[in-house]
Every structure is written in C-alpha cells, then in structure tokens.
Image (cartoon, rainbow, N blue to C red):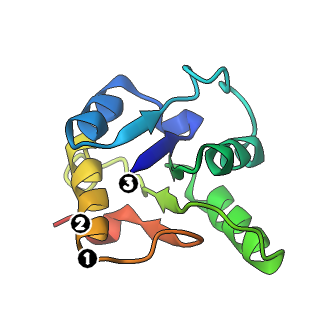
Amino acid sequence: MKVYLDDDADGNLLILALTSAGFQVLSPRALNMRHKDDLAHLERAVKERAAILTYNCNDFKALHSDWQTAKKAHSGIFIVYKYNNPKKDMTPAHIAKAIANVLHQGIPIENQLHALNDYKY
C-alpha cells in the first residue's frame, strides 16, 4: 500500500517505521511538494493512488466532507490526533501498526477517513 505523508507528518522516523512495515511511502520532500496547501497534498495523493496520512485532523476532516459532497474519489485519509502527552500520543511504530490493523481487518480505506488512534492496539 502507498502512503503519502502530509507536510506535518513528513518525518524520517515515521518514514522508517512505515517502510519497515512494508508500506511504500511518498514524502512531500521527495516530490517537491513541501509547504503546499492541504488540497494540493490530497490531490497529489490521489494522483499517486496513495492514502494520505496527516496530523492536521480538522482540515482533512473538512476536505473529506467536501470531497464526499462533490462525489470526488480519494484513496483514503488517515488522521492522527496529537495530545502532547507522550503516554497518549502515537509513536511512528504505533502509526505503522495501526495502518496494518486497518488493513488486516479488511476495513475499506478508499474514500474513507480513519482516525488511526482508534486502531492503536
């Protein structure tokens, strides 16, 4: 599965965790997409046929809603809530495992938005 990282999720430790878990990771740095707006990132993820991963939860919830209303397709949106609490925040390994949990359960990803915090187990 391809995972496109939004700017705020584009970190080396997350890339390492995801690639180690067998995911193909697309980084804004590698695609010359740094500092683009959220819509541009979602459109690029669609072009790449990749689910997008972001910590920018509210903006991507709104984008998902807009796309649903417009009947536009995307490859999935994974959001991760940050609590600024090391005991509650997801590590890169937790995030990779949560995506694997979603896939293992056969939960639809395309055109869906999933809060990965719900799959941290």
> Mark 3 = which residue?
83
Q: Residues within 10 Å of mark 3 (few under 14, many from 20)?
A: few
Q: Position of residue 19 (x, y in %)?
A: 28, 35
Residue projecting furthest to the right:
70
Residue sitting at x 51%, y 29%: 27
Q: Position of residue 12 (x, y in %)?
A: 35, 24
From the viewer's perspective, is residue 56 above or below residue 31?
A: below
Residue type at mark 1?
Gln
Q: Mark 1 or 3 closer to N-term?
A: 3
Quadrant in which the C terminus is drawn: bottom left
Residue sitting at x 33%, y 64%: 117
State whether residue 90 appears in this view. Answer: no
Q: Position of residue 17 (x, y in %)?
A: 24, 36
Residue sitting at x 71%, y 66%: 62
Residue sitting at x 39%, y 51%: 1
Q: Disc 2 to disc 1, how far (Cα)?
A: 6 Å
Q: Where, by quadrant of the figure, is residue 98 drawn?
A: bottom left
Q: Disc 1 to disc 3, how far (Cα)?
A: 26 Å
Foreground disc of the pair 3, 2: 2
Residue projecting furthest to the left:
121
Q: Residues within 10 Å of mark 2 (few under 14, many from 20)?
A: some
Q: Is residue 53 left or right of residue 101?
A: right
